[in-house]
Image: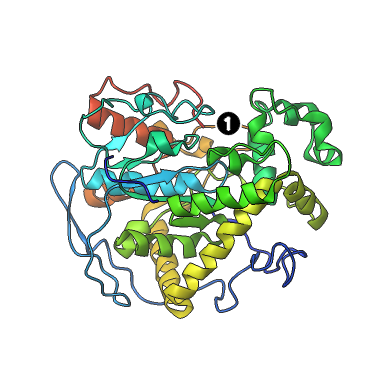
Amino acid sequence: MPPKSGWGWEPCTGRDPPWSGVGSPMAGVRGGFHPSLTSPLCSRGSPDWLPHLRLLPGGGAEERAPSNPLSPRHCQPRRHIVFLKTHKTGSSTIVNLLHRFGETRGLRFALPPRYQFGYPYPFQARRVKGYRPGGPRFDILCHHMRFDLPEVRRGGFYFSIVRDPGSLAESAFSYYRGVAPAFRRAGSLAQFLVAPERFYDPAERGNHYARNLLWFDFGLAPPAAPDPEAVRASLAQLERTFPLVLLTEHFDESLVLLREALCWAEEDVDAFRHNGRNPRAVRPLDPSQAARLRAWNDLDWQLYAHFNRSFWRRVEAFGPARLQAEVARLRERRRALAELCLQGGGPVEAAGIPDKQIRPFQFGQAQILGYALRPGLGPAEQQLCTRLVTPELQYKDRLDARQFGANGSQGAGGGRGR
């Protein structure tokens, strides 16, 4: 039963994994673009500047009907949302658009005391700042947690995002090498892949980052012995809980499907990529490495394959041609926003961002990129652009101060929360 009431983009290879053909266990899993879609998509139309919002004094906004000429619908935008923020999937970008949507409408966020809800321990409602049984309702829950449905269970729309375990594990190795003993012992990803079981002890703190990280984030425990029926039952329960699961590899298409599911305006899902590594630090996997990582993260691969199929079923229901047109408009708006907002037109290293309020937190082996704003922006543009580029930690602090007062937050330098 669904919960009851009460509460970057990665380059696609264009190829399917070799075992994803018809008749294989992974039949129906798509590694590249949907065959009816093209990339890149482009549009020569002029962007509309947030026609569904009117800025109000104090930074809020007045909401108007969602604008989508290809999908006129009579529905109300969803405001009660649970987003399971998974690790190394582009989820920080989703959090930014949820932050912006909620802030401009005065919605109430379920916030952690610092930057995550006791992770890696399962979510507990008592960890939500300001929570008390029978107290005021929260509208949006979107920060890092290990999912626990009985504790989270509140009304609203549940969704999440998953990523191919091959590229996810490469990113996790780069980011969490210092805190995952299995990665630290191996020294390099190539050494780890030779015999990962030599370095991995599931009982060691931090090693949840080293194997089946998606499975862990969704709150699932690995079966004591191989049990296909138990795995299928777990995935069926997840699908009943999460009616929409996005794909990192098809991020823009995911944003369009999210907009449709939430009955939001097209402009509500405009976003710049957040928490992305410097491309020079990303080492592409060869096919054999990707295959070994998928095999090592076997539960993650089954989870990813399951939601990959459900994603493309949703694309077919939405209409591939309609999706292609909306993705084109999304990319054109992003290009125009980058031209309006960003000094240099794109991401830069932290050293090139003088304002610490929009400088991303640095952790792991690779430089995390952020954005510097163009000088000379007008008041409305400054507000819009600042919201688009504010990193997750600083934005959480701002929401914390809005809900609990200026002394209610810890400060972005107060501890690692990612």
Could one spot residue 372 in this view of the protein? Answer: no
Q: From the viewer's perspective, is residue 322 above or below residue 262?
A: below
Q: From the viewer's perspective, is residue 144 above or below residue 389?
A: above
Q: Nearer the viewer, residue 185 or 309?
A: 309
The crowd level at tag 1 (other Cα within 10 Å; few <14, some 14-19, many 20+) is: some
Q: Is residue 274 left or right of residue 126?
A: right
Q: Measuring 27% from the left and 28% from the top, which residue is drawn there? A: 401
Q: In the displayed image of the protein, which residue is found farthest to the front?
A: 229
Residue kind at label 1, given as amino acid type: Phe
Could one spot residue 328 in this view of the protein? Answer: yes
Splitting the image into 4 quarters, where does residue 18 fall? bottom right
Q: Measuring 31% from the left and 48% from the top, which residue is drawn there? A: 156
Q: Measuring 58% from the left and 61% from the top, which residue is drawn there? A: 308
Q: Where is residue 61? Give x, y as percent.
A: 18, 50
Q: In the displayed image of the protein, which residue is found farthest to the right?
A: 194
Q: From the viewer's perspective, is residue 274 above or below residue 124?
A: below
The residue labelled by disc 1 is 363
Q: Where is residue 410? Give x, y as percent.
A: 37, 21
Q: Where is residue 413? Give x, y as percent.
A: 45, 23
Q: Measuring 37% from the left and 57% from the top, which residue is drawn there? A: 269
Q: Is residue 334 left or right of residue 349?
A: left
